[in-house]
Image (cartoon, rainbow, N blue to C red):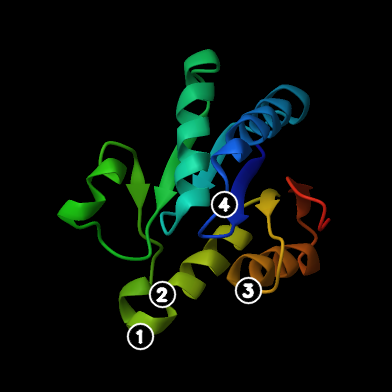
C-alpha cells in the first residue's frame, strides 16, 4: 500500500493543522495511503502527528510511526506513546548528520510527501530530494 511522510519547517502556524488533516484524509480515501511516517524535530512534525492521531480515530486501519533520529529523552515523552522506529544504520552516523540520514530514510520509504516549505532550508532540501526521486508532493503552501 502507498506510504506518506511529511517535511515542514520547525516553526509553523497552528492554523496548518486542518489543512494537514484534509490532506491526510484525501490520501487515505482517494489513493489508499495507509502508512504514514513522521519525524520528531519540530512543530510541523508535532502538528502532523496530532493530525494523524485525530484522523486515525475515523480511519482505524491506518498506521503511523514516528521515525526517530535520536533515542527519545524524558523531555520527549509526548512521542513515547506512539509507535516509533530508528532507521537501521543510524547508530553509525555522526550525531550532526543523523537528522539528514533519517530524512533520507523517510524519502526512500514514502510514495507521497506532504510539505510545508516556504524558504530554503532543511525542509525544502528534502522536498526537492523527494521530487528528484519521483515522489508526489502535496503542498500546504504556495511554494509548490
Visible in this render: residue 93? no
Q: Residue at x 33, y 81 (%)?
A: 95
Q: Earlier in the sequence, mark 2 or mark 3?
A: 2
Q: Which residue position holds label 3?
A: 121
Q: Position of residue 99 (x, y in %)?
A: 45, 71
Q: Earlier in the sequence, mark 4 or mark 1?
A: 4
Q: Earlier in the sequence, mark 3 or mark 1?
A: 1
* In contact (CB < 8 Å): disc 2 and disc 1: yes
Q: Which residue position holds label 4?
A: 12
Q: Residue at x 67, y 53 (%)?
A: 116
| Disc 4 versus disc 3: nearer the observer | 4
Q: Which residue position holds label 2?
A: 98
Query: Distance from label 2 to label 3 (Cα)?
Result: 16 Å
Q: Earlier in the sequence, mark 4 or mark 3?
A: 4
Q: Residue at x 52, y 57 (%)?
A: 11
* In contact (CB < 8 Å): disc 3 and disc 1: no
Query: Distance from label 2 to label 4 (Cα)?
Result: 22 Å
Q: Is residue 134 left or right of residue 117?
A: right
Query: Distance from label 4 to label 3 (Cα)?
Result: 14 Å
Q: Secondary structure at mark 4?
A: loop
Query: Distance from label 4 to label 1 (Cα)?
Result: 28 Å
Q: Secondary structure at mark 2?
A: helix
Amino acid at each position: 500500500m502507498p506510504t506518506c511522510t511529511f517535511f515542514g519547517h520547525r516553526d509553523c502556524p497552528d492554523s496548518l493543522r486542518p489543512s494537514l488533516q484534509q490532506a491526510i484524509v484525501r490520501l487515505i480515501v482517494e489513493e489508499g495511503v495507509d502508512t504514514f511516517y513522521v519525524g520528531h524535530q519540530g512543530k510541523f512534525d508535532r502538528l502532523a502527528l496530532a493530525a494523524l492521531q485525530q484522523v486515525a480515530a475515523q480511519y482505524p486501519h491506518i498506521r503511523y510511526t514516528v521515525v526517530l533520529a535520536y533515542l527519545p529523552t524524558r523531555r520527549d515523552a509526548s512521542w513515547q506513546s506512539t509507535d516509533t522506529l530508528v532507521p537501521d544504520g543510524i547508530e553509525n552516523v555522526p550525531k550532526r548528520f543523523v537528522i539528514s540520514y533519517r530524512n533520507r530514510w523517510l524519502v526512500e520509504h514514502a510514495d507521497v510527501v506532504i510539505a510545508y516549505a516556504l524558504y530554503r532550508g532543511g525542509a525544502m532540501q528534502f522536498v526537492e530530494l523527494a521530487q528528484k526521486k519521483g515522489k508526489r508532493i502535496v503542498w500546504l503552501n504556495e511554494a509548490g
